[in-house]
Image: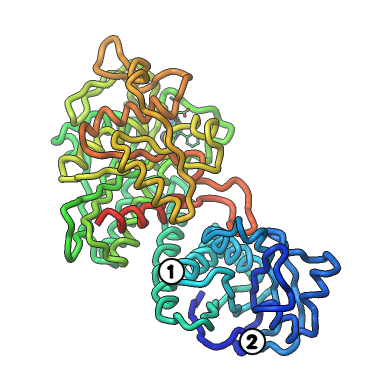
Amino acid sequence: MQVKTDGRKFYEIECDALVVGVYEGDAVHSGVLGEIDRRSGGVVSSLVETGEFIGKSGETAWIHSPGDLRARRLLLAGAGKQADFTQDSVRRMAGAAARLLRGKKVRSFAFMSPIAGGDSAQAAVEGALLALFEPDKYHTNDRTESRLEEMTLVADSGDIENVERAISRGRIIAESANFARDIINEPSNILTPSELARRAGEIAEQYGLALDVLDEARMKDLGMGSLLGVAQGSNEPPRLIVLRYTAPIASGETVAIVGKGVTFDTGGISIKPAEGMEKMKYDMAGGATTLAALRAVAQLRPSVNVIGIVPAVENMPGGRAQRPGDVVRSMAGKTIEVINTDAEGRLILADALTYARQQGATRIVDLATLTGAVSIALGDVYVAVMGNDQAWVDAVIAAGRRAGEKIWQLPLDREYREQIKSEIADIKNVGGRKAGTITAGYFLREFVEDTPWAHLDIAGTAWNDSTKPHLSVGPTAVCVRTLVQLVEGAG
Ligand code: BES
Ligand code: MN
Ligand code: ZN
């Protein structure tokens, strides 16, 4: 879809549909709404006065031949109470409108944001482009009869340049997120660790990032026994994917983004039940999101160096698979007793985090579909964050707030360390039923030493279980926006 801006008055813009947000209790006789009401022969005030449309969030009214407008249709979109309306509401409103209009075979639409300014324009573009993503790659009959071709952001208050910059940013970020969603959707017979590395190579080439892909031999040389222990049950060879962005004017910081890339998680010998196991193809969402963040960063060019690191493995119960009770030696030198082979994410991340430090990271953020327990704690609403440096954790939460992604901190107090003590090794890979998300986080903490680090558990939020007005079912690519915001703020 093309996105452009237009500085003319909203009633001068020719398009299939004009989308206008309406707050609950909005005055229908003055301002923009009043102007539309007059031009449409009172249709807005009539809808509101009869109570057929009162501006509740999610409510819509679809109006044919709306009178003296150059738009052929008018979509009134309920915005809810003005006091509750945020930048993220703009994102959802634009998204829901785009999906609804596509369903009505609309090809071009103009969007009037209830909030003026660049940030809101960016949110509108992100919302629309994210909303139009469909996981339809493997349908052999083309099920989309209609395509939205053009979105015009109404900028009649005059800040066209600002809006143009916002459009370009919004497009980069949303297309990067959709790139991640596409990879996350790929079935595991297609998206193996090697294939993930190949796709990272495509980004590197296209956007000018440096790429290094470590194979098994190099990982062995580095002593990555923890990662290799997980990989050994599969015929698919593991990869450690490294993408590097070097800033034109770099600050002193090097941010490492480390993402879990388990291309399929059977659980290994501690095998998972059959029910729902097909979903474990999304166990590389953290890795895909890392690649997406680097893809966006390469285009936005912030003043901080960024390394993206994705340990990519398949967790299988093959004849060479590791067993519960095995002890492996990590790159950091710490020994790990593998109590449960299904707690594999932390095992591959342990070595990837050590590698990030070795590569000169001064700050680390990792993201992983790490624990089922995070869904019990926070559902599909909040991403969990934990860390060893409160200022860095706060920066992550603040970046999330700006990006419209909800992140909630869980504690990592020393007491939790007791649960991952091992009788025969330095540490064990599971901590029992209590506080499963936290003990997983604590395990990772053991490998970052004193480097400021934050860990995001996205197991509850990376997959959308049912289609929403503004989002298709499937991968959300949660945290792409947060990571971009975080990196831009770290410069
Ligand atoms: N990939 C899973 C976590 C997961 C579960 C992600 C459900 C998305 C949805 C992870 O590797 C895992 O299996 N974790 C175990 C840990 C346990 C063995 C300590 C879990 O959460 O059950
Ligand atoms: Mn697992
Ligand atoms: Zn997993």
| Residue 297 image offset from top left, x and y in percent | 31, 61
| Residue 464 image offset from top left, x and y in percent | 56, 48
Q: Which residue is mark 2?
A: 11
Relative side of 456 to 248, left or right: right
Q: Residue placed at 43% from the left, 50% from the top? A: 400
On whether ligand 1 comes within 8 Å of the CB at mark 1, the answer is no
Disc 1 crowd rating (10 Å Cα; few below 14, some 14-19, many 20+) is many
Q: Which residue is mark 1?
A: 171
What's under tag 1, amino acid-wise? Arg
What's under tag 2, amino acid-wise? Tyr
Q: Which image quarter is the C terminus in? A: bottom left
Q: Nearer the viewer, residue 38 or 302?
A: 38
| SS label for mark 2 | helix
Q: Residue placed at 73% from the left, 86% from the top? A: 39
Query: Looking at the picture, does residue 286 appear above or below residue 165?
Result: above
Q: Residue placed at 35% from the left, 38% from the top? A: 455
In the picture as drawn, the residue positioned furthest to the top comes out as 423
Q: Quadrant of residue 393?
A: top left
Which of the two labelled residues, at mark 2 and mark 1, occupies the earlier sequence position? 2
Q: Nearer the viewer, residue 139 or 87?
A: 87
Query: Looking at the picture, does residue 154 appear above or below residue 237?
Result: below
Tell me, yes or no, if residue 326 can be seen here: yes
Q: Residue placed at 59% from the left, 52% from the top? A: 473
- Judged by depth in the image, the label closer to the viewer, 2 or 1, is 2
